[in-house]
Structure formats: structure tokens, C-alpha cells
Image (cartoon, helix red, strand yellow):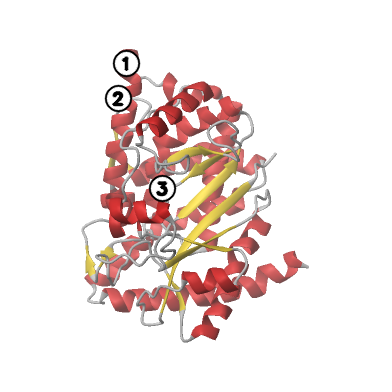
């Protein structure tokens, strides 16, 4: 049986020339379903939790079509791909809500480092101990999802040396997040962070993956994968989601996939796993699919692309048994042709400027969404 799935989608708005322009205060005031981020240059929408991928595709595309139509009423504006302020200005913070004290704290503490766009994938898991086990496994494998989705190689008009500049510079908070050994451990840890002010509130847990729910940390009902860059291609995003869901279904059938049962020495296993995945995240932010990683099972070196290929083969029977193998298959195209960051950097190497690359990506995204809306969303909306 498929799990429920939903997305939090953060996107930039701007001009067809790929200059990012802050419009979230007007969007949120006039358009249902969109919420503001602390900086006005990006805006977020959330899809409802659904099981079927066909419905998810419509829920990803339809709000963008609505947003594009609304942006035309404001002027010649559109949606800009990518996860960083690719053409600038990363030194300035544009408050979307000057009266919000939490936004003020974020601006003072982090500045424009948090002005990024991303995809958060939420997967429903109701049993808290199963959820903690799932968070442990996906914490270890989160760098693979970053490698697949990296889309932020530019900042302020220049390449940065990273495929995901967003994750390389984003202030993970608190700085050290453990593998939660139980729901009780998670509750205790969150209460300690709130008391110590290392977290300002229960939402102030900015790690690659976290348990989420209606009353955190007590009532939890979903895993939230937060590491992914903005994957503007909805079909590719569903492939990444199918990989994640298939892995979680596999874990539910085989609890021995728990990283706490890894082959690393037991004495320091917890600390070693955290150190290993922290380094893997940094490596994936730098080189994405070409990154040199270490596998959590045994600590052995492995290229991200090869690890994903192994994972793909491992979860394929689960995906096929649950009827979602067709949604998983675009992973192979990403492995073959590269993620968005790699394709953009290839274009840069051929002499295109970051502006030209972002302009082309903006047009391509609009055309793809229009085609999907026409071919897919109308039938499933009827």
C-alpha cells in the first residue's frame, strides 16, 4: 500500500531576464494556497497529502499555472528555476513581513544565506518508532537525494565551485543533530534545544531530514526530507519521490535496514554515522553525482552515482510490486545526463553566461508545465 506524500515547494519570482524580484507579499495577499518566506523574493506552496502519483503531478503543476497567470497581472514576471540567488543580490535581505519577530531573528542571525529555494518531500508514517527508524535511514542516505536534485551552481552571477551552493551555505540548525534512537529520545532532545535556545521554536530544526507532525515533537505523522534543491521538473521530482517511498516501504518490510545495525564498530557507531553523513552531505553539495562518499553500512568509499544505481536496483522490486516503477524510471535519465546543476555547468563550460542559462531554464520550465497541465491535469481534475 502506498504512503501519503506531499511537497513544500519554494520558488523565486522574477523577470524573463532571470532577475529575481520579491513579490511574495502581493502573491500571498491575492492568491490562495501560497505562503511567504522571511525574504520576499521567494514564495511557497504546499500540496495536499496524496497516495497516487498521477494526482501528485497535478497538484505540483496546477498552483504554478495559477501563479504564472497571477504574475502576468502584476507585469512581465515569471517563475525562476534554481535554488540560490543565481544572478544576485545575496548581500541584501528583503523582509516580507517587517512585523514578524521570528523573521527578524532569521535576518539578524543568518542574513541572505537562508534566501534559498528548495523542495521538501513529506512522506506519511503514523507509527512514531517506525518514523524514527525511517529518519535514521534517510538521514544516512539524504546526500544521494541532494546529488540527484542539485540546482544551485551559481551565486551573484558566478559559479561557486559547488553544485548545490544552497546546501553548502545553508545554516543547518542546530549544528549537531543526532540519530534519534526513539521517539522519547527525540522529545527529550527537542525540549533540551528549546530550553538552551539553540532552537527558537519547534520549526527551527533545519537538518537534512526531520520528523514532522501537527504538534511537534509529541504528535508526529510524517518524515520530511529537506535536503533537496528545487527540482523544477515535476516528472523528475516524482522519480526522486518514488525512490524515497520505495526505500521507506523496503525499510518497513525489513527493519534490519536500520543504520544503528550497521557494520561500523558498535562503540562509536552513533557518532561515526553522524560524522560520515555530515561529510557525505558536504561532498554531495560540492560534486553531486560525482561526489566521493562513504557508505553507511561499512564506511567503504563509493561514488554517489554508483550508490544511487545500487539503491535503484535494490528498491526496484518494491517499486514494481507497488505499481510505481514507471515513476521511478526517470532516475536513470538523471544518472545518464546529469542533474540540473551539472547540465548548467556544462553549458557554462561551452561559453554560455549564467544569465543565458537561467533564461533558457525559465522558458523550458514554463513550456514543460504548460504541456503537463494540458496533457495530465485536465483528465485527473475531472
Q: Residue at x 49, y 40 (%)?
A: 313
Q: Which residue is mark 2?
A: 272
Question: In the drawing, does residue 152 fall left or right of residue 240?
Answer: left
Label 2 sits on a secondary structure element that is: helix
Q: Residue furthest front?
A: 99
Q: Earlier in the sequence, mark 3 or mark 2?
A: 3
Q: Residue at x 57, y 40 (%)?
A: 246
| Viewer-side label of 2, 1 | 2
Question: Could you tell me how far apart the alpha carbons at marks 3 and 2 are, in whole angstroms?
Answer: 20 Å
Give the label on residue 227, or none.
Answer: 3
Residues at marks 2 and 1 touching, judged by CB atoms closer than 8 Å? yes
Question: Could you tell me how far apart the alpha carbons at marks 2 and 1 are, in whole angstroms?
Answer: 9 Å
Q: Earlier in the sequence, mark 3 or mark 1?
A: 3
Expressed as whole percent of the image width and height from the top left, the position of residue 1 reads: 70, 39
Residue 82 vertical position relative to residue 144 in the rendered view, above or below: below
Whether residue 293 can be seen here: no
Q: Which residue is mark 1?
A: 265
| Viewer-side label of 3, 1 | 3
Expressed as whole percent of the image width and height from the top left, the position of residue 27 reads: 53, 72
Expressed as whole percent of the image width and height from the top left, the position of residue 41 reads: 40, 68
Label 3 environment density (alpha carbons within 10 Å; few <14, some 14–19, many ≥20): many
Amino acid at each position: 500500500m502506498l504512503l501519503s506524500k506531499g511537497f513544500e515547494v519554494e520558488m523565486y519570482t522574477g523577470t524573463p531576464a532571470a532577475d529575481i524580484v520579491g513579490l511574495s507579499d502581493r502573491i500571498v495577499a491575492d492568491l490562495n494556497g501560497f505562503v511567504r518566506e522571511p525574504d520576499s523574493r521567494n514564495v511557497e506552496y504546499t500540496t495536499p497529502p496524496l497516495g497516487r502519483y498521477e494526482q501528485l503531478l497535478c497538484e505540483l503543476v496546477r498552483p504554478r499555472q495559477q501563479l504564472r497567470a497571477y504574475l502576468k497581472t502584476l507585469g512581465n514576471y515569471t517563475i525562476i528555476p534554481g535554488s540560490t540567488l543565481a544572478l544576485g543580490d545575496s548581500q541584501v535581505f528583503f523582509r516580507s513581513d517587517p512585523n514578524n519577530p521570528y523573521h527578524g531573528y532569521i535576518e539578524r542571525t543568518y542574513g541572505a544565506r537562508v534566501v534559498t529555494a528548495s523542495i521538501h518531500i513529506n512522506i506519511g508514517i503514523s507509527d512514531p518508532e517506525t518514523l524514527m527508524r525511517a529518519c535514521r535511514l534517510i538521514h544516512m542516505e539524504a546526500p544521494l537525494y541532494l546529488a540527484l536534485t542539485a540546482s544551485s551552481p551559481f551565486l551573484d552571477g558566478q559559479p561557486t565551485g559547488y553544485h548545490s551552493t544552497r546546501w553548502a551555505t545553508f545554516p543547518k540548525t542546530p549544528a549537531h543533530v543526532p540519530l534519534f534512537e526513539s521517539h522519547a529520545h527525540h522529545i527529550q532532545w527537542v525540549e533540551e534545544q528549546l530550553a538552551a535556545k539553540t532552537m527558537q521554536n519547534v520549526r527551527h530544526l533545519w537538518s537534512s531530514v526531520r520528523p514532522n507532525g501537527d504538534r511537534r515533537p509529541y504528535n508526529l505523522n510524517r518524515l520530511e526530507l529537506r535536503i533537496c534543491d528545487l527540482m523544477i521538473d515535476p516528472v523528475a521530482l516524482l522519480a526522486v519521490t518514488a525512490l524515497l517511498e520505495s526505500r521507506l516501504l523496503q525499510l518497513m518490510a525489513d527493519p534490519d535496514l536500520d543504520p544503528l545495525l550497521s557494520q561500523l564498530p558498535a562503540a562509536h557507531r552513533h557518532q561515526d554515522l553522524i560524522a560520515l553523513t555530515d561529510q557525505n552531505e558536504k561532498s554531495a553539495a560540492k560534486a553531486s553525482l560525482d561526489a566521493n562518499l562513504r557508505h553507511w553500512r561499512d564506511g567503504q568509499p563509493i561514488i554517489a552515482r554508483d550508490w544511487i544505481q545500487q539503491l535503484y536496483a535494490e528498491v526496484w522490486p518494491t517499486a514494481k510490486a507497488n505499481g510505481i516503477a514507471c515513476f521511478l524510471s526517470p532516475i536513470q535519465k538523471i544518472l545518464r545526463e546529469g542533474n540540473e546543476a551539472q547540465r548548467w555547468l556544462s553549458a557554462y563550460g561551452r561559453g554560455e553566461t549564467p544569465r543565458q542559462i537561467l533564461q533558457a531554464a525559465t522558458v523550458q520550465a514554463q513550456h514543460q508545465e504548460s504541456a503537463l497541465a494540458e496533457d495530465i491535469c485536465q483528465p485527473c481534475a475531472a
